[in-house]
Amino acid sequence: MREGLEQTLTVTRLGVGGSLLQTVESTNPVESMIEIIRDHATRVKRWSSGEMALRWAAAGMLAAEGQFRRVKGYRELPQLALALERATTDEPGPLDLPAAVGA
């Protein structure tokens, strides 16, 4: 029940609503892409390095690209980007905390 609560509150705090909210609440687009990558990479019999795995993952993403659809609420993405920029510049990160507190 608590899984995803922090992310839900973050989305709400950023002011995401409408169709874009429905899109970001769902993990289906990401899960679909991961499944296509997995199917694409099953053809590999011998993994020689991590770099090779990255190349196959990239190739799988390119294969998945043809099945992507427009994000519902895509017109609201500029407002989300602006809200994210404001949130990340206004709040101190974990490394900035001592400087923000004055320590």
Image (cartoon, rainbow, N blue to C red):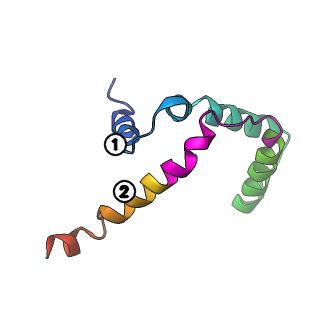
x, y (%) of residue 28? 61, 28
At horizontal 31% and vertical 63% (from top left) the residue drawn is 90
State the image coordinates of residue 59 (x, y, percent, origin top left): 81, 50
Up-down: is 40 above or below 25? below
Given the current orientation, which residue lies at the most extreme top position?
1
Q: Quadrant of the C terminus?
A: bottom left
Q: Secondary structure at mark 2?
A: helix
N-term-proximal mark, 2 vs 1: 1
Q: Amino acid at mark 1?
A: Arg
| 84 vs 22: above or below | below
Label number found at residue 13: 1
Query: Residue at (62%, 37%) from the top-left corner?
Result: 30
- Label number found at residue 87: 2
- Coordinates of residue 54 in the picture (x, y in percent): 72, 56
Mark 2 surroundings: few (<14), some (14-19) or many (≥20) residues within 10 A: some
Q: Nearer the viewer, residue 7 or 31?
A: 7
Residue placed at 79% from the left, 39% from the top? 64
Q: Is residue 75 magenta?
A: yes
> On the picture, is 64 further left or further right than 21?
right
Give the magenta part as a residue range: 65-81
Residue 98 lies in what quarter of the image? bottom left
* Disc 2 + disc 1, Cβ < 8 Å: yes
Q: How many marks?
A: 2
Relative depth, front residue between 58 and 101? 101
Residue 83 point in image, percent of width and height: 43, 53
Of 12 and 46, nearer the camera is 12
Left or right position of 102 against 27: left
| x 55%, y 30%: residue | 19
